Image (cartoon, rainbow, N blue to C red):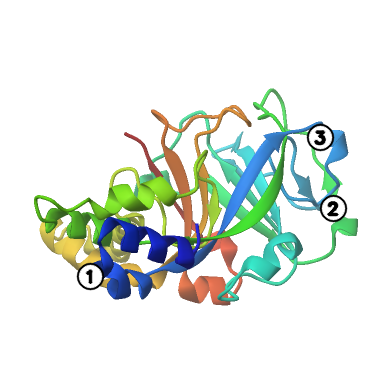
Amino acid sequence: MTREDIIQALDTAGLNPYRDALLTRLRPAIRVRVKPADENDIGIGASKFGGSPDLTPEVPWPELNGSPLHFLAQIRLEECHSLDADGLLPEAGLLSFFYDAENQPWGDLEQAGGWAVLYHPGPSGALVRRTPPGSLERFRPCQAVFDPTVTYPFEWVEEADQSAGEEEEYLSEVLYEIGDKGPDHQLLGHPSPVQGAVETECECRRLEAAGESGLPIAELIKKAEERAGDWLLLLQIDSDENPQWMWGDGGSLYYCILRQDMAAREFNKSWLVMQCS
């Protein structure tokens, strides 16, 4: 989906009054498309979903309370750097994503450690393909390719729908028709939430960790909404039959990171939210 697609769709649907406000809220993102592949055909350090991770020999396999986390994906940043319109990601290196796929934590404060993001800033030559420890499940390996796209804030679009006239098309339906189809894997941009504002959930957890869990829930959410802009979506991983995984009842995982941590390349501080219907 492009800005031009949105402009044309709004014009066709007679929704031009929303045009300027929507266009100013768009964020560029990178669509990740995957298809099953023989892992031997995927180079060491190349982008992929599933299979076995490529790590340096000295890096410990991420674990929680002695149990290894499942490897989900790795992103070779050189492969998608040209599509990072805002220059948020490093130009080079490898991001590796892990998750407790057996227990599938939602991202509550007490579930911290049920996911991990590793960043290797160096070249692929230092990496080796690591076999998952013990009987840990290995998801089906998939090649990953990248496409540019634009994303919109779902919460704002929902508010627009609520103010629509009786004869007016819903903005959300118009955008859905022109949107990218298939599993919704995505780097950066606005998340595609299943239940609610992902960034607000992340900020709620940060406030709780700072000792504000005793606030009335309405006050906690209001405070989190005010600070939700501090968070960025790093990677969204959808349920997908290609790598053969499902999050809850067909939901998504959202790896998010504070803007300051993104700038400092402290990807180990990423927070995760899992949502499903």
Give the label on residue 39, or none.
3
Q: Which one is earlier in the sequence, the residue at label 3 or at label 1? A: 1
Q: Check disc 3: other Cα within 10 Å, few if <14, some if 14-19, many if 20+.
A: some
Q: Tell us which disc is closer to us: 3 or 1.
A: 1
Q: Residue 214 sits in which quadrant?
A: bottom left
Marks 2 and 1 sit apart, C-alpha to C-alpha, by: 52 Å
The amino acid marked with disc number 3 is Glu
The amino acid marked with disc number 2 is Leu
Q: Residue at x 26, y 55 (%)?
A: 171
Left or right: residue 78 versus residue 85 is: right
Marks 3 and 1 sit apart, C-alpha to C-alpha, by: 49 Å
Mark 2 — residue? Answer: 127
Q: Which one is earlier in the sequence, the residue at label 2 or at label 1? A: 1
Helix, strand or loop at label 1? It is helix
Residue farthest top in this picture = 135
Position in image of residue 94 (x %, y %):
72, 58
Q: Which one is earlier in the sequence, the residue at label 2 or at label 3? A: 3
Give the label on residue 17, or none.
1
Q: Is residue 216 visible?
A: no
Q: Is residue 96 visible?
A: yes
Helix, strand or loop at label 3? It is helix
Q: Tell us which disc is closer to us: 2 or 1.
A: 1
- In the image, residue 229 sits, relative to residue 117, either above or below, namely below
Left or right: residue 273 versus residue 125 is: left
Left or right: residue 212 versus residue 150 is: left
Position in image of residue 233 (x %, y %):
47, 60
Report the front residue among 173 and 252.
173
- In the image, residue 5 sits, relative to residue 55, either above or below, namely below
The amino acid marked with disc number 1 is Pro
